[in-house]
Image (spheres, rainbow, N blue to C red):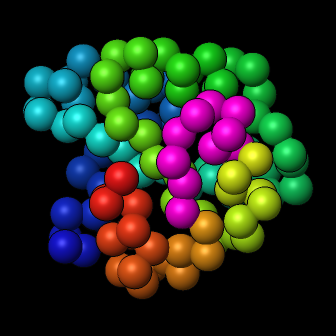
């Protein structure tokens, strides 16, 4: 399973992810880390541009799940605003949190 989680592409930012290419490759779901990936660890809210990008991603039919080592209140606050599932205390890079995320 872990080999499936190795990145095969790198982009400078979230906004450079080509969703059309993902669809062509048959990718239907994407797991995202939160802290220091989408937003700084000490911020409570996403920038409006990032939030809009996620809403568009969901409108395109992608399943999204946030996977974080942070606590439940931190993860659920972001998940509720976007109405996507999330896994808190994922203990990444261990498999248990990633397995919980893939069950969504």
Q: Which residues are magenta?
A: 78-87
Residue at image point 36% right, 44% down: 30
**Which residue is at the far left?**
25
Q: Residue 2: x percent and y percent?
A: 24, 74
Q: Is residue 76 shown in magenta?
A: no
Q: Residue 40: x percent and y percent?
A: 78, 50
Residue at image point 82% right, 38% down: 45
Residue at image point 75% right, 20% down: 48
The quadrant holding residue 73 is bottom right
| Residue 36 visible in the current orientation | no
| Residue 8 visible in the current orientation | yes
Between 99 and 41, the one lying in front of the other is 99
Callout count: 0
Q: Is residue 79 shown in magenta?
A: yes
Between 39 and 16, the one lying in front of the other is 39
Q: Residue 96: x percent and y percent?
A: 40, 80
The quadrant holding residue 68 is bottom right
Direction from residue 59 to residue 5 in the image, left or right: left
Direction from residue 4 to residue 54 in the image, left or right: right
Direction from residue 41 to residue 76 in the image, left or right: left
Q: Residue 52: x percent and y percent?
A: 62, 17
Residue at image point 19% right, 73% down: 1
Q: Is residue 91 above or below residue 65?
A: below
């Amino acid at each position: 399973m872990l080999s499936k989680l190795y990145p095969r592409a790198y982009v400078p930012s979230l906004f450079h992810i080509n969703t059309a290419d993902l669809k062509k490759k048959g990718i239907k779901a994407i797991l995202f880390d939160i802290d220091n990936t989408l937003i700084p660890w000490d911020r409570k809210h996403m920038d409006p541009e990032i939030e809009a990008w996620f809403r568009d991603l969901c409108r395109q039919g992608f399943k999204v799940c946030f996977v974080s080592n942070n606590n439940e209140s931190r993860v659920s606050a972001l998940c509720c605003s976007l109405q996507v599932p999330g896994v808190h205390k994922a203990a990444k890079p261990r498999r248990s949190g990633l397995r919980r995320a893939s069950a969504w």
